[in-house]
Amino acid sequence: MLQDKTVIITGASRGIGKQIAIQMAEQGANLALMGSTEEVHDTKEEIIAKGCSHVLAFTADVAKENEVDHVVQAATNAYGTIDVLINNAGIGKFKKVEDVTVEEWKKTYDVNVQGVFLATKSVLPQMKKQQSGTIITVASDLSRYAVPEGDPSIHQLNMLFKALWARWLRKSELLELESERLIQEKWILPLEEERKETGSNRSG
């Protein structure tokens, strides 16, 4: 199903994003991987070692429009289409309100909400041109509930995609916009250990 399809994955350095990248490469996808650290290039090399050669990797900040646009343009130039965007990059600071710094608040919003907005905004013109495309956003089930010491950015993310759904699908049905959980049980324990070490993270 993914043979020769172009897939952009944010937060692909480790965790969920890395596992998605490996599985999609095994299905024959052309990959463009984004990560906030140099580890994203390790993900690329691991995929190439498995015999999958169509993979690009970029150290980029999803909260910076010029860096996101560069990745999307490079993927388009290399592969000709953008078939799937997976918004996976995300961070969380689960603290009492009085313990959250302004810098932590801004960083969480920049990655979890603005990052999704910018990547989605960047791929939409090419997807509309193709009259096809899938956008998947990996988010927590906590976006459905209010919880103590929760992260409000996940609620903003949920509303963002409801707005996108209403705007694009009702008028054209050119795009399939999904907000979907892509977590398999075999990933949960390693990610839980990573969360304890880093303060929670699906990104990279």
Image (cartoon, helix red, strand yellow):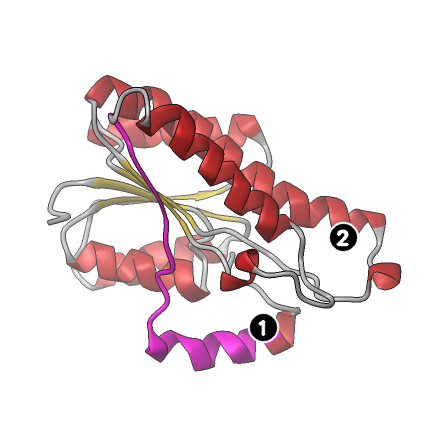
Q: Is residue 104 above or below residue 80?
A: below
| Magenta segment includes 177 | yes
View extreme (right): residue:
98
Position of 121 relative to 179 (above/below)? above
Residue 69 position within the rendered picture, expressed as x and y whole percent measured from the top left:
46, 27
User: Residue 64 occupies which quadrant of the picture?
Assistant: top right
Residue at 68%, 63% in the rendered image = 150
Label tally = 2
Left or right placement of residue 24 versus residue 145 in this view: left
In the picture of the structure, the residue carrying the numbered disc 2 is 104
SS under mark 1: helix
Q: Is residue 203 above or below residue 8?
A: below
Q: Is residue 86 above or below residue 117?
A: below
Question: Would residue 85 be visible to someone looking at this image?
Answer: yes
Q: Which mark, by number, is residue 184?
A: none
Residue type beneath disc 1: Arg
In primary-sequence order, the first of circles 2 and 1 is 2
Going 23% across and 55% down the picture, which residue do you hit? 24
Q: Amino acid at mark 2?
A: Glu
* Residue with the mark numbered 1: 195
Categorize mark 2 by other alpha carbons within 10 Å: few (<14), some (14-19), many (20+). Answer: some
Per the image, is 43 magenta?
no
Q: Residue at x 54, y 26 (%)?
A: 66
Residues drawn in magenta: 174-195
Q: Nearer the viewer, residue 26 or 121?
A: 121
Q: Is residue 70 visible?
A: no
- Where residue 160 appears, as percent x and y from the top left, is 52, 37
The location of residue 109, given as percent across then percent down, is 66, 44
Q: Residue at (60%, 57%) from the top-left corner?
A: 91
The answer to which quarter of the image holds residue 76 is top left
